[in-house]
Image (cartoon, helix red, strand yellow):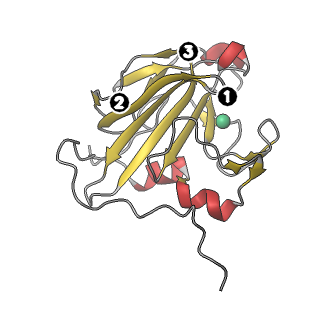
């Protein structure tokens, strides 16, 4: 048996967090509640990203064919939760991370990056579909406007990326820490 990977994180606590609202379902982060009018036309989950030399741990959402025409469009919290991070990062630009508690006590964290504007502060309670910022182009307009969007299984740093000392993690390891964003949302739609 190989040694246990010491970077394998502990399981998320199942003790309910009484200070955090329980989610009543998940909507898409851009467009209408169903994400209509938008699509993952940039890097998809686990695509090889040549710009970062690693697997892409989220989805790049755009209005297809819009170029920078989606700059400034609203970005919404996908579910009820609490803002974990709202900050500027030199690689990702403006980033918001929101903590969510599912009815079974499991937590997930949604991350929204390359934003033009951030409308929330750490510790703030947010509702599903509340606008938390606008679509941007990242630091120094490094990218064509899009939303970089992740769903994490752990409370990671705002700028966490699946690499160690420049070496990309394999897909199996990335999937220990990150969920397929649109597949997760599709499995967890609100009843209303
Ligand atoms: Zn991306």
Q: Is residue 11 left or right of residue 191?
A: right
In 3D space, how far apart are the residues under numbered discs 2 and 1 (Cα atoms)?
A: 22 Å
Q: Is residue 70 left or right of residue 131?
A: right
Looking at the rendering, the quadrant in which ligand 1 lies is: top right
Q: Residue at x 34, y 44 (%)?
A: 100
Q: Residue 15 location, x and y as percent?
A: 23, 59
Q: Earlier in the sequence, mark 2 or mark 1?
A: 1
Question: Is ligand 1 closer than 8 angstroms to the Cβ of mark 1?
Answer: no
In 3D space, how far apart are the residues under numbered discs 3 and 2 (Cα atoms)?
A: 18 Å
The quadrant the C terminus occupies is: top left
Q: Residue at x 27, y 61 (%)?
A: 104
- The image quarter in which residue 136 lies: top right
Give the label, 3 or 2, closer to the camera.
Answer: 3
Q: Residue 42 location, x and y as percent?
A: 71, 36
**SS at mark 3?**
loop
Farthest residue in the left direction?
18
The quadrant the N terminus occupies is: bottom right
- The image quarter in which residue 5 lies: bottom right
Q: Residue 91 location, x and y as percent?
A: 67, 27
The vertical placement of 98 against 4, above or below, is: above
> What residue is shown with label 2?
129
> What residue is shown with label 1?
64
Q: Which mark is residue 116?
A: 3
- The image quarter in which residue 69 lies: top right
Q: Is residue 36 visible?
A: no
Q: Is residue 67 left or right of residue 156?
A: right
Q: Earlier in the sequence, mark 1 or mark 3?
A: 1
In 3D space, how far apart are the residues under numbered discs 1 and 3 (Cα atoms)?
A: 19 Å
């Amino acid at each position: 048996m190989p040694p246990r990977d010491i970077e394998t994180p502990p399981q998320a606590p199942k003790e309910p967090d009484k200070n955090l609202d329980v989610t009543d379902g998940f909507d898409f982060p851009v467009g209408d509640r169903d994400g209509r009018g938008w699509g993952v036309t940039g890097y998809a989950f686990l695509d090889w990203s040549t710009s970062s030399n690693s697997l892409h741990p989220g989805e790049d959402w755009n209005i297809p064919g819009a170029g920078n025409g989606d700059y400034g469009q609203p970005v919404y919290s996908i579910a009820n939760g609490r803002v974990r991070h709202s900050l500027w990062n030199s690689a990702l630009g403006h980033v918001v991370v929101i903590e969510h508690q599912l009815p079974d006590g499991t937590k997930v964290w949604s991350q929204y990056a390359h934003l033009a504007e951030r409308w929330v502060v750490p510790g703030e309670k947010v509702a599903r579909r509340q606008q938390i910022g606008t679509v941007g182009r990242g630091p120094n307009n490094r990218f064509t406007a899009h939303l970089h969007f992740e769903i994490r299984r752990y409370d990671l740093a705002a700028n966490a990326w699946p690499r160690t000392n420049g070496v990309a993690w394999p897909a199996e390891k990335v999937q220990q820490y990150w969920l397929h964003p649109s597949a997760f949302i599709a499995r967890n739609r609100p009843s209303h």
